[in-house]
Image (spheres, rainbow, N blue to C red):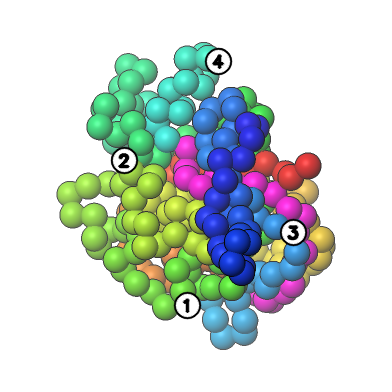
Amino acid sequence: MSQSRGGMLRQLSPGRFRVEHPLVVNAKDGSVLVYVPGGEFEMGSAAGEGSDDERPRHRVELSGYWIGVYAVTNAQYLKFVQATGHRAPEHADYGEPEWKAGRFPAERADHPVVCVSWDDAVAYANWAGCGLASEAQWEKACRGPLGLAYPWGNEWDSSRCRHDRNRRNETTSAVQGYPRGVSGYGTYNQTGNVWEWCADWYDAKYYGESPRKDPGGPAGGSGRVFRGGGWGGGGPGGFRAAYRYWGGPGRRVVFQGLRLVRMAS
C-alpha cells in the first residue's frame, strides 16, 4: 500500500491536531482503504431484536485492519480482468448483467461491480493483495465507533442509502453516492447499493460458539455470508449492520459486489 493520504483532522488544542480515520491507497488496484483500530465491539442483536441467527449479542475483539472506503468499481474490476484473463461478470443467475463483450457502460465506471460470485470476489481480492472482510470486520466497520444499528445512527432513514424504494428507474449508484449515509469510520454505502461478500461460511448458530478474538467463521458450510442490503430491497430490517444473509459461493446476481480488507501490520 502507498503512504497515507491523510484523513480528517480534529483540533485538540491550539496548534495541535490529530488525524482521525487515516487513509491509504492500495497500490495494486487504487482502492482507498480506511483504518479501523483494534479493540472490542458488540456484535449481533439482543434478545427480541433481529432474527435468531443474529443472537446471542456478544463482545468480539478484533485486531486492527484496513477496509475499503468504497466497494470495488467496474473500472477497477476491468483492470483485473485485463491483467489476469479472469472471466468478466457477463452472466447473472438473477437479473440482467451490465457487462457485455468484456465491457460495461462508460457512465457506470464508478458504480460497484456486480454479478461476481464469491470465487470471483476472492480472486480479485487476492490479485489486489487484500482479502474479503470477516463478518465481524464488516459489522464493526458498518456500526462505526459508536456501535450503531445503521452506519448513520440507530434509526432507519430511507434517504441515506440506495434501495428499491428510492432508486426510481435506476439500479446501483456511484460508490461515492449517499454521503449522508457514511459510517463513523468513513465507509460509504455499507448499507444499501449492493450486498457485499464476506470471507465466512454461514452457520445460523455460529454466534453461540464463535471465538471472542478475531472470529473467522465456521470451518465449512454450504453458503458464504454477504452483508449490507442492496438496491433490490426496501425493508429497513435488511439494512441493519447486524443483518446476516448467505448464498452459494457460485451465486452471481445484479445487486451483489465486494469490498476489500487488509490486515494492519
Dots 2, 3 in contact, CB < 8 A: no
Residue at the disc numbered 3: 38
First reached walking from the N terminus: tag 3 or tag 4 = 3
**Residue name at image x 59 percent, y 27 percent:** 27
Toward which corner of the image does residue 37 lie, by quadrant? Answer: bottom right
Residue 95's disc number: 2
First reached walking from the N terminus: tag 1 or tag 4 = 4
Magenta stretch: give its range.
54-72
**Residue name at image x 40 percent, y 40 percent:** 112
The residue furthest front is 15
As measured in the structure, the alpha-carbon distance from the residue carrying label 1 to the one carrying label 4 is 42 Å
**Residue name at image x 54 percent, y 28 percent:** 29
First reached walking from the N terminus: tag 2 or tag 1 = 2
Q: Are there few (<14), some (14-19), or many (20+) residues within 10 Å of tag 4? A: few
Reply yes or no: does residue 173 show up in magenta. no
Is 130 on the left-hand or right-hand side of 196?
right
Residue at the disc numbered 4: 84
The residue furthest left is 169
